[in-house]
Image: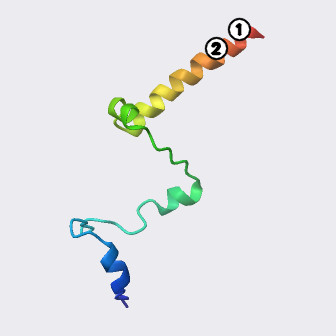
Amino acid sequence: MKVNNKKNRSDMLNEYDFQGGVRGKYAKRYQEGSNVVILDRDVAKVFHDKDSVNSALRALAGIIHHQVQGQG
């Protein structure tokens, strides 16, 4: 049974379109644990997707790891 909540409808802008949305699409991943990071606009212009961000962070982590090992 659908609940018609006029208060929530008034908060929604007309240009929002959820017709192609899938309820709970990421629920399992969220339950397993998630870490959301908001990129600044200038950084987001360089890193367009999660793969490019992860690749850069892995490279940086490798550099840091290598430098830390060299100090000890």
Relative to the observer, which residue lies in front, 13 or 59? Answer: 13
- Give the number of marks: 2
Q: Position of residue 49 (x, y in %)?
A: 36, 38
Residue on which the image places disc 1 = 70
Residue 66's disc number: 2
Q: What x and y, as percent, mark residue 36?
A: 51, 48
Task: Give the secondary structure at mark 2.
Answer: helix
Tell me the residue at 65%/19% (across/down): 65
Q: Mark 1 and mark 2: span between their CA atoms?
A: 6 Å
Is residue 10 depicted above or below 35 in this figure?
Answer: below
| Residue plotted at (35% across, 88% down) | 2
The extreme right residue here reads 72
Left or right: residue 27 versus residue 4 is right
Residue at 33% across, 33% down = 45
User: 1 above or below 59?
Assistant: below
Q: Quadrant of the C terminus?
A: top right
Residue 71, above or below 7: above
Give residue 66's quadrant in the image: top right
Q: Quadrant of residue 18?
A: bottom left
- Say which element carries label 1: helix
Amino acid type at image mark 1:
Gly
Label 1 Cα neighbours within 10 Å, binned few <14 / some 14-19 / many ≥20:
few
Circle 1/circle 2 CB separation < 8 Å: yes
Determine whether, in the image, residue 55 is placed left or right of residue 5. Answer: right
Q: Amino acid at mark 2?
A: His
Give me the residue at 41% from left, 39% from top.
Answer: 50
